[in-house]
Image: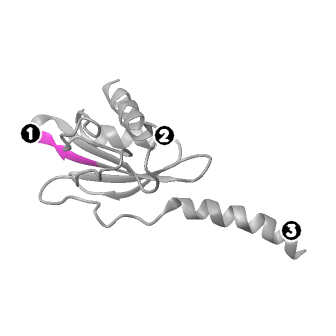
């Protein structure tokens, strides 16, 4: 009986470990979102490096909230008047990506940052996610 329990518990604990800890660099810092780390698993509209840079989303935070609420495996963690933070969890391994939005109403745009918590490469998942959100908001 103990062998069967161990066979079940080891993969379960491994999957649970894929979530990682929530970074302490999230949120608004000096009026903007944090820069991406050097690893290629992050995109940000405030990062000037070609590998990390992505355009802000035209529109409002409320439209973005509607768009991401319709997506799979998303948990909105924090919502303020000008800021929205959500966690997206991958289907297979349970990896968590931290996705932030900061409204810039004067320019009718929302700055974005999407970063994987673990690993080095994300195979373009964060960029694809932001582009899917951009598409949903523009429709």
Badge 2 or badge 1: first in the primary sequence: 2
Residue situated in front as seen by the camera: 137 or 118: 118
Q: Residue at x 25, y 57 (%)?
A: 80
Q: Which mark is residue 4?
A: 3
Depth-wise, is mark 3 or mark 1 nearer the camera?
A: 3
Q: Which residue is mark 2?
A: 71
Give coordinates of residue 61: x percent, y percent: 26, 43
Crowdedness near tag 3: few (<14), some (14–19) or many (≥20) residues, C-alpha within 10 Å: few
The question of residue 51 being in magenta is answered with no
Q: Is residue 14 above or below residue 46?
A: below
Badge 3 or badge 1: first in the primary sequence: 3
Disc 3 on helix, strand or loop? helix
Is 133 placed left or right of 60 in the picture? Answer: right
Give coordinates of residue 101: x percent, y percent: 27, 47
Q: Which mark is residue 106?
A: 1
Q: Which mark is residue 42?
A: none
Q: Quadrant of residue 122?
A: top left
Is 117 placed left or right of 49 in the picture? Answer: right
Q: Is residue 56 above or below residue 113?
A: above
Disc 2 on helix, strand or loop? loop
The quadrant of the rendering that contains the N terminus is bottom right
Q: Quadrant of residue 23?
A: bottom left
Q: Residue at x 62, y 59 (%)?
A: 15
Between marks 3 and 2, how big is the CA–CA gap? 36 Å
> What is the magenta range?
101-105
Depth-wise, is mark 3 or mark 2 nearer the camera?
A: 3
Kindly indicate whether the residue at mark 2 contacts the one at mark 3 (C-beta within 8 angstroms): no
Residue situated in front as seen by the camera: 104 or 93: 93
Q: Is residue 90 above or below residue 79?
A: above
Between marks 3 and 1, how big is the CA–CA gap? 59 Å
């Amino acid at each position: 009986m103990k062998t069967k329990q161990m066979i079940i518990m080891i993969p379960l604990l491994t999957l649970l470990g894929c979530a990682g800890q929530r970074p302490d660099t999230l949120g608004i810092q000096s009026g903007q979102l944090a820069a991406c780390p050097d690893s290629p698993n992050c995109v940000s509209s405030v990062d000037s490096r070609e590998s990390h840079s992505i355009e802000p989303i035209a529109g409002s935070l409320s439209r973005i909230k509607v768009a991401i609420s319709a997506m799979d495996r998303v948990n909105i963690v924090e919502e303020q008047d000008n800021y929205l933070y959500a966690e997206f969890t991958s289907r297979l391994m349970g990896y968590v990506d931290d996705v932030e939005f900061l409204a810039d109403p004067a320019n009718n745009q929302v700055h974005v940052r999407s970063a994987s918590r673990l690993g080095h490469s994300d195979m373009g998942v964060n960029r694809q996610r932001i582009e899917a959100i951009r598409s949903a908001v523009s429709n």
